[in-house]
Amino acid sequence: SYRDRIRNFCIIAHIDHGKSTLADRLLELTGTLSERELKDQVLDSMDLERERGITIKSHAIRMKYRARDGEEYILNLIDTPGHVDFTYEVSRALKACEGAILVVDASQGIEAQTISNLYLALGHDLEIIPVLNKVDLPNARPDEVAQSIEELIGEPAEDILRISAKTGEGVPELLERIVQRIPPPKGDPEAPLRALVFDSVFDTYRGAVVYVRVFEGTLKTGERIRFMSNGREYVAEEIGILRLERQPVEMLRAGEVGYVIGSIKDIRSARVGDTITHAHRPASEPIPGFRQVKPMVFSGVFPTNPEQYEELRASLEKLQLNDASLTFTPETSAALGFGFRIGFLGLLHMEIVQERLEREFGLDIITTVPNVEYQVVLRSGEVITVDNPSEMPDAGKIAEIREPYVRADIITPTEYIGPLMQLCQDRRGVYRNQVYLDRTRVNLQYELPLAEIIFDFYDKLKSVSRGYASFDYEILDYRPSDLVRLDILINGEPVDALSTIVHRSKAYEVGRKLTQKLRELIPRQLFDVAIQAAIGSRVIARETIKALRKDVTAKCYGGDVTRKRKLLERQKEGKKRMKQVGRVEVPQEAFLAVLSVG
Ligand code: GDP
Ligand code: MG
């Protein structure tokens, strides 16, 4: 059958281990791209993405390969995002494949995302082909790393391919191995249509371009399709395969990978993970495992200049066209005015969105401290979710607060086990296990509250391990915790944008440090300013900013009017970067102060 000569696979790797470089070599060796066309790393198309060296959105590309058995094969390479924030997308992309190439940098060895991606791939029963990359590097230790791969997945160390994605060494052998080891797709082209959406991007002219892997049935141009999660129907105006550009074809059969375009104006109706079927002969069940991705980290985003509010909304709507996982709702803060509460998949996602708002849309924004979403059981028995600390009900009304926990894998050279365990302990971590990968490297497994890792955990982890430890996590569940809302009052007025949720055991310390930090950040005013930290009505820390005695214009010896005016003007300019809270001027940094007191 036609399916015997199709291979659907992806490349998984820890960041920087050479996934994109290997993809380029495969495109080049199969003649999909000439060297000239091969602007480096074609699969990472977004600028920001290229700069950060991460693959944010997955793409797919089809190659033709004449194997040594004389047959021509179709190789569909599905590119997966490598970062934990996009785990669900990784998982959907893996589902579209029968095999995965696991790339491990022979100078670095196994890292956290090697393991987390491997778990995901094994969870989908993929055929794994491990390769040692960067064997051209003088500090490569292929024998040792091969041994640890053998211990991890059971592939005999001597069978593991050694390649250099950079020079191309060993890559022809890898192509042969892909054909030999990865099974061809199964699925009946006559059955009712089931096509998995593993990605979608927004095209201004065509609407959503939906990337699909057909599992059963055959999809032809002009047919009426239905998204099974929401029942929406469209006409498949164009279907095609993905070379470097989209290439229309008449049909996509079971086992094939391609795209569908159908005047889909809202990318949220074409969600990753959904199943497309025929309107006239629908499949009875969708491909299992679809879920709406849920944002895990929230932060308030406010325009520095209130007049940019509508611009901010328009920009967020634009971003959302290409990022169905981005959610936002209007938020009003007494301190910061009108803005939005934005939900992100994780910290990296948050950084990317903030950066795009500033860079691509030229907006000046103030962001508040990120927080997780809490489940709150009220005394009335009702359960509510709270994604904004200032909306946490008063303690008297609360029976229980639950917070999200993650399962974390930390991979480190053994000499840093001590400090890393200390770090996890400080972050309320629950020790689970430690697994040796080889003589020198160990996988520490912890369960941690998500709230404890969203600020600066990664930086701390890197600093206590001199950069050697790597880290990845997945969301586990919600657990009850002894949490309290810590409020900050300035001259007796609570400042909503400064409220945080903290563990009771840390409330005093955070309260003390936060008030001290605010005392440093808030400039002296013409009157005394009291800064208090409080839990409910109980004040737990207090600092005072003493009044500025001298009028700033006093230096101007009275007479010189122009000079005096200039000074006043300059003062006014300074004010622009301030927010007026009651009578007090509070600088932007203050709204992020809690980040520095962890
Ligand atoms: P990705 O994050 O996994 O996509 O990694 P990249 O493909 O972007 O590679 C990260 C860095 O490693 C880049 O600077 C590459 O040029 C380099 N690199 C990738 N493969 C090799 C290799 O085989 N040998 C050497 N010396 N460098 C490589
Ligand atoms: Mg890459």
Image: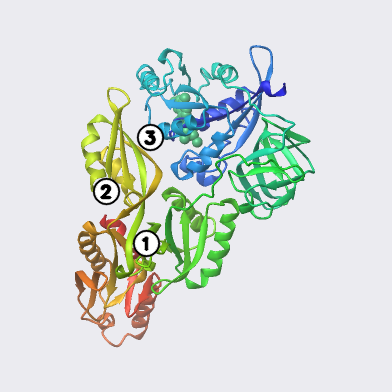
Say whether residue 317 is left or right of residue 409.
right
Residue beneath disc 2: 427
Q: Is residue 499 visible?
A: no
Q: CA distance from mark 2 to mark 3?
A: 19 Å
Q: Which element is circle 1 on?
A: strand
- In this figure, which colouring scheme has been used for the structure? rainbow
The quadrant in which the C terminus is found is bottom left
Of the two numbered discs 1 and 2 on the same chain, state the one appearing first in sequence: 1
Give the image location of residue 57, x and y in percent: 55, 43
Q: How far across and down, in percent of the image, does residue 264 sit?
A: 69, 52
- Number of callouts: 3
The residue that label 3 is drawn on is 112
Compared to residue 43, the image places residue 512 above or below, namely below
Res. 119 visible in picture:
yes
Report helix, strand or loop for mark 2: loop
For marks 2 and 3, the one nearer the N-term is 3
Residue bearing the label numbered 1: 377
For the point 24% across and 72% down, the residue is: 531
The image quadrant that residue 481 belongs to is bottom left
Give the side of residue 227 with respect to residue 345, left or right: right
For the residue marked with disc 3, what is the amino acid?
Ala
Of circles 1 and 2, the one toward us is 1
* Quadrant the N terminus occupies: top right
Q: Nearer the viewer, residue 396 or 497?
A: 396
- The residues bearing labels 1 and 2 have C-alpha atoms spaced at a distance of 24 Å
Between 169 and 561, the one lying in front of the other is: 169
Residue at far bottom of view: 559
